[in-house]
Image: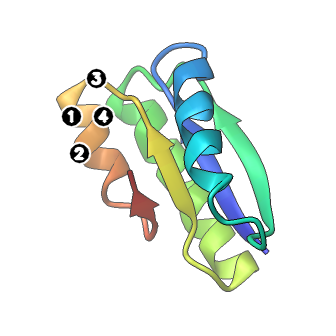
Amino acid sequence: MRTVFFVSDGTGITAETLGHSVLTQFESLRYRRVRAPFIDSVDKARELVGRINESAVLDGHRPIIFSTLVNPEANAELRRARALVL
């Protein structure tokens, strides 16, 4: 099973809607959903990256991240995760 993170600096609804639209194309993909709303600072992004990297180790698969972050510094921090960031 792979973990999919829906990351946003708001409620996460847009990221989740986008992600689900893409994931419906892969019917056989089994995944666990994690919504990460209100990631509006570099510190919050850094903490989330730790959770994402832990998930990669526990799952044995690189997580997928659907992100709608606007803050360039928080976005850059998120991209340091061991994950596919979309």
Residue type, numbered disc 1:
Glu
* Disc 4 to disc 3, C-alpha distance: 8 Å
Dot 4 lies on which element? helix
Amino acid type, callout 2: Ala
**Residue to which mark 3 is pinned:** 70
**Marks 2 and 3, how far apart at CA:** 10 Å
The one of 17 and 39 positioned closer to us in this rendering: 17
* In front: label 4 or label 3: 3
Q: Which dot marks residue 76? A: 2
Q: Who's the residue at 48% across and 53% down the image?
A: 49
The local secondary structure at tag 1 comes to helix
- Residue placed at 73% from the left, 78% from the top? 59
Q: CB of mark 2 within 8 Å of CB of mark 1?
A: yes
Give, as a three-letter code, the residue at label 4: Ala
- Residue 74: assigned label: 4
Disc 2 to disc 1, how far (Cα)? 5 Å
- The answer to whether marks 2 and 3 mark residues whose Cβ atoms lie closer than 8 Å is no
Q: Are marks 4 and 2 in contact (CB under 8 Å)?
A: yes
Give the image location of residue 46, x and y in percent: 42, 45
Which residue carries the number 1 mark? Answer: 73
- Give the farthest residue toward the left: 72
Q: Residues within 10 Å of mark 3 (few under 14, many from 20)?
A: few
